[in-house]
Amino acid sequence: MFAEALISIVSRLAPLGAGGGGFWLPAQASELAKEVDSDWALVYWLSAFFFALITFLLVFFSLRYRSRPGHKEEQTASHNTPLEVVWSVIPTFLVVILFWNSYTTFLQMVTPPAGAYEVLVTGQKWNWLFTYPNGYIDADLHVPAETPVTLVMTSEDVIHAFYVPELRVKRDVMPGRYSKVWFSATQLGEYDIFCAEYCGTSHSEMLSKLVVHEPADYEAWLEEASDFLSRMPPAEAGEMLYEQRGCKQCHSVDGSAGIAPTFLGLFGTEEQLADGSRILVDENYVRESIYDPMSRVTAGYDPVMPTYRGRLKDEEATAIIEYIKTLRQ
Ligand code: CUA
């Protein structure tokens, strides 16, 4: 009874490889997660064993050799060759085993299989963009299950880090170069994507979703999602782009002040610019602000917006303008 309870508590604290996460670790949603967790469990159990052994010996020796009346101090041993060999050779084997386990997992982690499905990832302040092989861009990462997926990642501005705990995947995303990760998702469902590198004001809100689809449904999803401009009225497509492409991180639509001017009641008004002049917010000014955001910055805001040149098609910019028009007061 007691033994059973103990085993159940202990197995929750440190799953031995297989299983789904546990007390310390999130659920396992990739092949790699099992490898990482069994390496982790080995370190955990070794540490637990030696912690128990050392604590026991500490208490035992403190009691056994404590100073007390009638107990004479004995000469301390200076040297014990067999003992020293034992405590040198065993730990040496242990660290070699730990190294070997981690190294083989690491090699697996950094070697994408040939022919993996490729998605381009762009990190920018403060959102993620995922570009699929057909050119469609989404704010969430959709992948088919049981399929190796390689992410080719780069940043528009500062260093970000792509992190999905359930996949046990975390990699820096840097401007001016590409980094890669790969994984094969084993569990259908939705998982959080985080940025794990402090990248400025809204770092903690740099969140996206990973959606793992049934492999048979994936192509249908991609086709449907890619076709959004012909499916939706422009203002509705614009709202979706506003949510997905990072406008939302800085421009509110409820009038609240943020890093950038709110879109509520913006269209058709006159704005004061940083250089003191005034400008009418019309289609042309919004379009210019999307593609060339530094040219005419609104007074009172820092020039921090990235350009969307090459990342928003003309029809998409038009859809966003149509959406901003619906927010007139
Ligand atoms: Cu991007 Cu933190």
Image (tube, rainbow, N blue to C red):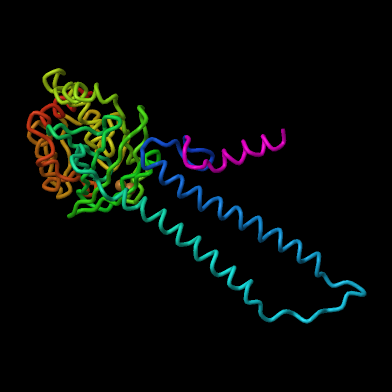
Looking at the picture, tell me which residue is in the foreground, 161 or 61: 61
Circle count = 0
The answer to whether 121 is drawn above or below residue 215 in the figure is below
Looking at the picture, tell me which residue is in the foreground, 33 or 140: 33
| Residue drawn at x 9%, y 31% as measured from the top left | 283
Looking at the picture, tell me which residue is in the foreground, 290 or 61: 61
Q: Is residue 3 left or right of residue 24?
A: right
**Residue 291 point in image, percent of width and height:** 10, 41
Q: Is residue 58 left or right of residue 219?
A: right
Can residue 11 be found in the magenta stretch? yes
| Residue drawn at x 57%, y 39% as measured from the top left | 11
Q: Is residue 131 left or right of residue 21?
A: left
User: As drawn, which residue projects farthest toward the right?
Assistant: 70
The answer to whether 63 is drawn above or below residue 241 in the figure is below
Q: Quadrant of the N terminus?
A: top right
**Residue 226 point in image, percent of width and height:** 15, 26
In this picture, which residue range is highlighted in magenta?
A: 1-19
Which secondary structure is most common in the magenta stretch? helix
Can residue 122 be found in the magenta stretch? no
**Residue 203 point in image, percent of width and height:** 34, 46
**Residue 206 point in image, percent of width and height:** 32, 41
| Residue drawn at x 12%, y 30% as measured from the top left | 316
Q: Quadrant of residue 239?
A: top left
Q: Quadrant of the C terminus?
A: top left
